Image (spheres, rainbow, N blue to C red):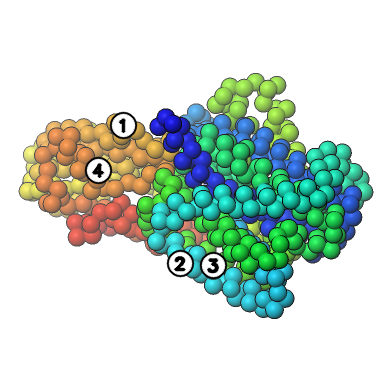
Amino acid sequence: MSHAREKTWILVISAVGVVFGDIGTSPLYTIKVCFLGNSGLSPAPENVLGLISLIFWSLMLVVSVKYALFILQADDNGEGGVFAMLALLHKKMGAGLGRGLILAGLFGSALLYGDGLITPVISVLSALEGLEVATSSAKPVIVPLTCCILCLLFWAQSRGTGKLGKFFGPVMFLWFAVIGLSGAAAIYRMPRILEAANPVHGVRFFINNGWQGFFLLGLVVLCVTGCEALYADMGHFGAKSIRISWYLVALPALLLNYFGQGALILLDPGSAGDPFFGLIPHKLLYPMVLLATLATIIASQAIISGVFSLTRQAIQLGFLPRMRVVHTSGMAEGQVYLPDVNSLMMVAAIVLALYFKNSDSLADAYGIAVTGTMLITSVVFYFISRWIWQWSAIKALPLCLLFWVMDLTYFTACLKKFTNGGWFPLSTALLIMIIMVAWWDGWKRLAVKVMTITVPKEKFMEKVASGKLIRLPGTGVFLSTFSREVPPMLLHYVNQTGALYERLVILSVLTADVPEMEESKKIEVANMGYGVYKVTAHYGFMEAPDIPQIMSIVRAKGLDINLDEVTYYLGRISLVRDHKKTMPRWRRFLFMFMLRNSLSGSSYLNIPPSKVMEIGVQMQY
């Protein structure tokens, strides 16, 4: 086997373990909640055939066609996700990228946070509810046991998933094999269920059930939860590996299990209460509950890691304030751990488990976030096809209209669940979007103010060349957020001390509209004369800057400096309230609060605290 082929299959195994954990565990609850709770759907044969038909065509059209064939093509240097799409459009349009499109992208990414909170809870709850099938005495311990598992899950995040990564793929392969075989056994006993592949049964389902059938789509859509992971994790595994693992492993197993659950209900309508565990022989129930719990933990791990990655992208692109980012030796490239985000998610997940108590109730909160993200992805995809791929409107519109109709139908059907729990993911997304917009707008306004007190490098060099400044021994590195202007703190330092280091480095760290920057283009060094150097470090939005590492590269490029004697200077802006009403009071308060509590530049940029000096500047805001 060639090295390239071996690498592909390794990525396929990893993708099965990470990408398809969420969608792979959806059979635990999808069909069950359609017949229970508020739906009122009877397990009559025509309803069973219609429901399985809707699930079949949802998997085929939404996942197999929309995402696997088309959305995966919209990559930014191999990276996927809503932020990658925005970065791709920004590179093409620049300042011409409309604010409305940016806000839509932000809301789509914010909706994923709601998904990230609900997925661990509903997955673990639905797995442990299998104990009720084995013994009714297990019911009182399910919620406490769920909370314990969630606590352990979030506690383990700080350890990183690298050590567990090699087990994820094999466990999920076993999971897909078991659910596929259990479904196939039921299909063998009731082959009539295969008629559900005919879309006529889906149409009849709507005719027979009317509006009830339409709003039931809000539960049917649970079968495609996690489809955004195909796109968001593309940079970790590649589109080819994801497609192979979907078409050859995940899709066949899911179809066999869903059809098997339908066959079981046709044989025994009473099994509609929990058809997934009804497929399992009674003596194998406990091992299956254990396997289901492991699978749901893996699914939860994948979505939690996705939220961490999404948050880091938002920080790099300037949509969120700096937070502590810990890099782990993860199974996927760029895996990170954010302690603050992890703590908030753990508290929210436990509150959700205690509030909803069972997967049937929580299913009402699930779906709105997923379908909302799907719809926004389809909208942004249209602009990708038109502006990036240069498709004509005649070519792009029919395909995108199909996507919009599908996504809008699912989203509308989910809106009925708003009062029963659907308010939670929407409220979460709205809150996170408000925070993102407040930081994004606030930082842009602040940057404009800071620009008024900067000077071009050329004018600063005239002052250096005058010879009136005292030159101090050693190397001073002044960090700057500007590419051409001298940072205000450097001017402040020179004006107050009348001195300058013998070797002065003005270091700018810039985030580019690419996931990762090529090593050859990452560091630029310009000698401005008189011992002054301009260093520009370019990083992608999936990368984390490391200042000591940058300075090591600068030294390797020929700059004669002793890294042990370098002093780093960072600016800290202290905002004083401006009585002029230039923006709403609440937004100003929110931005100033986030600025005060954001992670210091030294911690975020991995600079040793003993080598850092901060220069404070007060500004009215």
Give the CA distance from mark 1 to mark 4: 13 Å
Asked if 99 appears above or below 182 in the picture, the reply is above
Q: What residue is pinned by disc 1?
A: 521
Residue drawn at point x = 14 percent, y = 34 percent? 558
Residue 601, position as x, y percentages in the image: 31, 54
Residue drawn at point x = 17 percent, y = 52 percent? 567
Q: Is residue 434 visible?
A: no
Asked if 97 appears above or below 496 in the picture, the reply is above
Question: Badge 4, how many Cα within 10 Å: few under 14, some, many 20+?
Answer: some
Nearer the viewer's eye, disc 4 or disc 2? 2
Three-letter code, disc 1: Lys
The label on residue 550 is: 4
Q: Earlier in the sequence, mark 3 or mark 1?
A: 3
Q: Earlier in the sequence, mark 3 or mark 2?
A: 3
Asked if 16 appears above or below 282 in the picture, the reply is above
Q: What residue is pinned by disc 2?
A: 155
Q: Please name whichever residue, 513 or 220, is drawn nearer the observer in this view of the structure.
A: 220
Question: Badge 2, how many Cα within 10 Å: few under 14, some, many 20+?
Answer: some
